[in-house]
Amino acid sequence: MTKQDPIPARLAALKTTSTPDLKQQWRDLFDSEPPPFNRRYLESRLAYRIQELAYGGLKPETVKRLEALGEQLDGGDRKKSRIRADLTPIVGTRLIREWQGVEHLVTVTADGFEWQGRPYKSLSAIARAITGTRWNGWVFFGLKNHRRGA
């Protein structure tokens, strides 16, 4: 009789684990406080970490290759490299906002955003085009609470 690998069972159990227990697992596995992200994020990062600890992490060559690709993407621009990918909507996400009885649909693209068939670099530019006044685009589209800052 062969010993069964417990990792798949641990990964499956994440789906039914309570959020407080997921946060405790985060503390145990990462030795830090869990980030204030949604449950899906916690589950996916915990699943990765469990597998990383059991089977090993990325090979050094892979890490170097990923760093080189990242360098190509942001061109060494330190400001771009500090933008947290987990705070930006995923490409293809559709943001819907009603303004004065009109529904506006914005699609997240690889280069920014698209509204009414036109590309925009920022949500604030779209919010300004819709309202005629200056807005924080993240607040306008409900992605950020302007009082709490997140």
Image (spheres, rainbow, N blue to C red):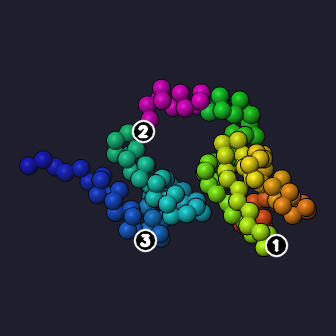
Q: Is residue 68 located in the magenta-colored stretch of the structure?
A: yes
Pick the quarter of the image with the C terminus. Answer: bottom right
- What's the residue type where badge 1 is placed? Gln
For disc 3, the marked residue is 18
Sequence-wise, which precedes: disc 2 or disc 1?
2
Residue, far left: 1
Q: With 115 as the anchor, is 7 left or right in this view?
A: left
Q: Which residues are magenta?
A: 58-69
Residue 100 bears which disc, if any? Answer: 1
Choose top left, top right, bottom left or bottom right for residue 17.
bottom left
Label 2, residues with CA under 10 Å away: few <14, some 14-19, many ≥20: few
Sequence-wise, which precedes: disc 2 or disc 3?
3
Q: Is residue 45 located in the magenta-colored stretch of the structure?
A: no
Label 1, residues with CA under 10 Å away: few <14, some 14-19, many ≥20: few
In 3D space, how far apart are the residues under numbered discs 3 and 1 (Cα atoms)?
Answer: 41 Å
Choose top left, top right, bottom left or bottom right for residue 33.
bottom right
Observer-nearest of 94 and 49: 94
131 lies above or below 45: below
Residue, far bottom: 101
SS of the residue under disc 2: loop
In the image, residue 104 lies at what x, y percent? Answer: 74, 62
Sequence-wise, which precedes: disc 3 or disc 1?
3
Residue displayed at 82% across by 72% down:
100
Residue 57 bears which disc, if any? Answer: 2
In the image, residue 85 lies at what x, y percent? Answer: 63, 48
